[in-house]
Image (tube, rainbow, N blue to C red):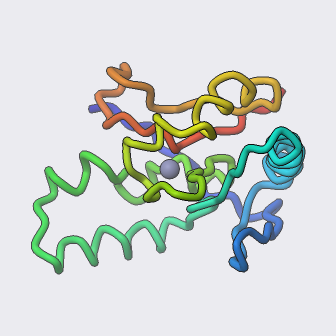
Amino acid sequence: MTRLPFVEEEQSLVPIWDSDREFLMHLKTAEAWNCMNARASSEGINLRIVSAFRSVAQQEGIIERKRRKGLSDADIFRVNAPAGFSEHHSGRAIDITTDGYLPLEEEFEDSKAFHWLNENAKVFGFALSYPRNNQFGIAYEPWHWLYKEK
Ligand SMILES: [Zn+2]
């Protein structure tokens, strides 16, 4: 498994509200998300944010809580990046779900929202980071989309 390090974004984070929760994103990612979400809504597609920016310290907390629950490092790092190695540190990655689906589950790929994203996300600068059988050996994550500056 090869994960790349990501620098924690500090300068250009802006708040985005979704489902009464505040998320932080890099400014350009937030602009692109707002455009994409508005288009999706206008086409009857419901997109909801599960997670956006995450600090290195928050990532350490996630891993620590899983260790305390008794999960092995092998199990943890199959689905979580080590602290310092998550695309979420960059403020450019968004985990997306839609009404009627459990967040962060592979079944999201069966949703109308996922099909819409597959067709349209690239127009707004978003790409799936970890498709099935990806080169990084990281678990398939149909919910995890990264904004790549155009
Ligand atoms: Zn993610």
- Tell me which corner region of the image, top left, top right, bottom left or bottom right, holds residue 60: bottom left
Of residue 85 and residue 134, the one placed in the foreground of this image is: 134
Residue sitting at x 14%, y 50%: 74
Q: Relative to residue 122, is residue 139 depicted above or below?
A: below
Point out the image quarter for the N terminus: top left
Q: In the image, residue 26 lies at what x, y percent? A: 77, 55
Q: Relative to residue 130, is residue 96 depicted above or below?
A: below
Residue sitting at x 80%, y 67%: 16
In this picture, residue 84 sits left or right of residue 93: left
Q: In the image, residue 58 lies at what x, y percent? A: 48, 73
In this picture, residue 122 sits left or right of residue 60: right
Of residue 36 and residue 85, the one placed in the foreground of this image is: 36
Q: In the image, residue 125 lies at what x, y percent? A: 77, 30
In this picture, residue 2 sits left or right of residue 70: right
Residue sitting at x 47%, y 35%: 109
Point out the image quarter for the C terminus: top right
- Tell me which corner region of the image, top left, top right, bottom left or bottom right, holds residue 35: top right
Q: Relative to residue 142, is residue 133 depicted above or below?
A: above
Total marks shown come to 0
In this picture, residue 100 sits left or right of residue 40: left
Residue sitting at x 23%, y 57%: 76
Q: In the image, residue 31 lies at what x, y percent? A: 89, 49
Of residue 59 and residue 30, the one placed in the foreground of this image is: 30
